[in-house]
Image (spheres, rainbow, N blue to C red):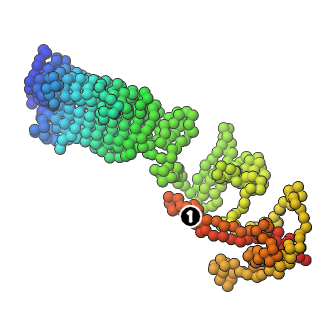
């Protein structure tokens, strides 16, 4: 197939220059940078032919030094500088394409490279779309300049394709745009993998500077070493799919930087600029920090996880999978100061290695328990005489001790000290006669006849004994009556019980050491 010749002097054409078919091997053609002005409402240069599509065609064309100027755009709707139609293996280097509805339009073009093209003063700088035969795939733009167009560029329907931009400039497009005009200055819709390397976006007013909508949530926008200077309301908008931004600067100028839609996720590494939108699937690494749902600053913690990220992960902030896991804490010299260790077959450990240090446990903003405080070999409450060991609805079943409990009996802690009056002594005599043998109901339910016998008194009978002497047992510390509301069961996301269900109820109890002391008065 013979190649057409390009004019050697500035020329006006009314019909397209057409190169189609399979040239059989790399065919070189130099347009000589001679200005060609086209007046028709259609392509100036047509590579391939939509009327005769054949997926096996590879044009195998190497075209250099184009200079194409379009007609008056007020009279056209479909003027095109370079049209690549249902063909592959096109290589265009060095060209100025201006004043078209579409400076470069590929319709079913793929496996093609464009070097050093300036696409300007047009409706679209580039426009990449699909046909039944080909989707825009494996397209490379090197040193592209898309300048002063209504739209910088647009690609559509390459869900399994790749489009690469190297050292490209998209600047000064949509000059009359506003923050709410709905314009996506450069848009990739129903997209596969779109990759920008060392590229620059600047002075592109409108609602969206760069807009990416992946064909599904697995498709990816990659920007490495790029700069997006604020011009639009949103600089980089990821509606669906993934965004991987590396060593790039997304300048906001008081507007939004990178925005993620509800079906988007992303990874940002050393990216300057803020992030907004749905951030539960976004992780950022910057300034030696890792942020989940936040782009960290040097003053942030080393790891910063925002609530939306944790909620999206079923409220599991971290998961360590091993039979033995240890979180180790060290001083700056490498000496271990403590650790937390779990085991699939033995005990879990929470340990402070400091000889003079223990562990403090707290709740609702206060310390409730010390273990080994200050090196003491003791378990202590967080404050003196304010913390109970158990409660009315939640009791300890048994307390094992090598000796009895020690209760404060210091005269300095007491006042209104007196002898028992006659009514109290009479009540003590009544209580002495109330000693009973009994079994606990829960023990009988679990052990049947093997449940053991216990000796003691019945709290309600003690209450009645006091009443018979005109006394109110509730005013004495030996008698206790607890009431509580129902507490619902609390589960985690795996249905493990964090807090058991506790029905509402009441319970009577006694301080036996006081009761026995009281009963001694009857002897």
Residue 324 drawn above or below residue 433: above
Would you say 330 lies left or right of 236 here?
right
Residue 362 drawn above or below residue 14: below
Q: Quadrant of the N terminus?
A: top left
Q: Which residue is mark 1?
A: 488
User: Which image quadrant for residue 332?
Assistant: top right
User: Which image quadrant for residue 15?
Assistant: top left
Would you say 472 lies left or right of 69 here?
right
The image shows residue 174 at horizontal and vertical percentages of 29, 27
User: Which image quadrant for residue 446?
Assistant: bottom right
Q: Is residue 110 visible?
A: no
Identified at 42% across, 41% down, the residue is: 277
Would you say 174 lies left or right of 484 here?
left
The image shows residue 45 at horizontal and vertical percentages of 14, 27
Residue 80 drawn above or below residue 355: above
Q: Quadrant of the C terminus?
A: bottom right
Identified at 11% across, 26% down, the residue is: 40
């Amino acid at each position: 197939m013979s190649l057409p010749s390009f004019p050697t002097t500035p020329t006006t054409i009314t019909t397209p220059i057409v190169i189609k078919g399979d040239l059989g091997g790399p065919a070189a053609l130099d347009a000589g940078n001679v200005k060609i002005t086209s007046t028709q409402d259609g392509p100036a240069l047509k590579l391939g032919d939509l009327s005769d599509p054949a997926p096996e065609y590879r044009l195998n064309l190497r075209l250099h030094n184009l200079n194409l100027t379009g007609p008056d755009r007020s009279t056209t709707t479909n003027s095109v500088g370079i049209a690549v139609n249902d063909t592959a293996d096109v290589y265009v280097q060095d060209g100025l394409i201006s004043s078209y509805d579409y400076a470069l339009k590929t319709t079913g073009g793929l496996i093609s490279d464009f070097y050093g093209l300036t696409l300007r003063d047009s409706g679209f700088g580039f426009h990449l779309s699909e046909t039944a035969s080909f989707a825009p795939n494996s397209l490379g733009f090197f040193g592209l300049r898309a300048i002063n167009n209504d739209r910088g560029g647009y690609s559509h329907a390459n869900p399994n394709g790749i489009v690469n931009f190297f050292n490209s400039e998209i600047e000064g497009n949509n000059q009359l745009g506003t923050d709410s005009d709905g314009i996506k200055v450069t848009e990739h819709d129903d997209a596969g993998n779109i990759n920008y390397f060392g590229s620059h976006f600047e002075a592109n007013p409108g609602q969206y500077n760069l807009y990416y909508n992946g064909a599904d949530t697995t498709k990816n926008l990659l920007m490495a070493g790029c700069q997006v200077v604020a011009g639009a309301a949103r600089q980089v908008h990821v509606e669906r799919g993934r965004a991987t931004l590396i060593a790039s600067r997304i300048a906001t100028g008081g507007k939004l930087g990178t925005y993620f839609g509800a079906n988007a996720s992303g990874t940002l590494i050393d990216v300057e600029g803020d992030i907004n939108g749905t951030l539960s699937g976004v992780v950022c690494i910057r300034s030696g920090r890792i942020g989940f749902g936040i782009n960290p600053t040097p003053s942030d913690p080393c790891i910063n996880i925002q609530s939306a990220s944790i909620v999206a992960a079923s409220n599991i902030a971290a998961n360590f999978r091993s039979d033995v896991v240890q979180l180790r804490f060290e001083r700056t010299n490498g000496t271990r100061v403590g650790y937390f260790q779990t085991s699939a077959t033995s005990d879990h450990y929470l340990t402070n290695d400091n000889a003079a240090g223990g562990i403090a446990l707290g709740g609702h903003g206060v310390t409730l328990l010390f273990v080994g405080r200050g090196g003491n070999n003791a378990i202590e409450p967080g404050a003196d005489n304010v913390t109970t060991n158990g409660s009315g609805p939640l009791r300890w079943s048994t307390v094992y001790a090598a000796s009895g409990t020690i209760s404060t009996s210091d005269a300095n802690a007491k006042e209104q000290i007196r002898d028992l009056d006659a009514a109290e002594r009479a009540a003590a005599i009544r209580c002495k006669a109330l000693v009973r043998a009994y079994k606990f109901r829960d023990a009988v339910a679990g052990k049947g006849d093997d449940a053991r016998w216990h000796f003691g008194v019945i709290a309600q009978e003690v209450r009645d004994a006091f009443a018979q002497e005109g006394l109110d047992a509730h005013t004495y510390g030996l008698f206790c009556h607890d009431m509580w509301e129902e507490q619902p069961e609390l589960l985690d996301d795996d249905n493990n019980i964090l807090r058991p269900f506790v029905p509402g109820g009441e319970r009577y109890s006694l301080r036996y050491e006081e009761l026995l002391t009281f009963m001694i008065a009857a002897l």
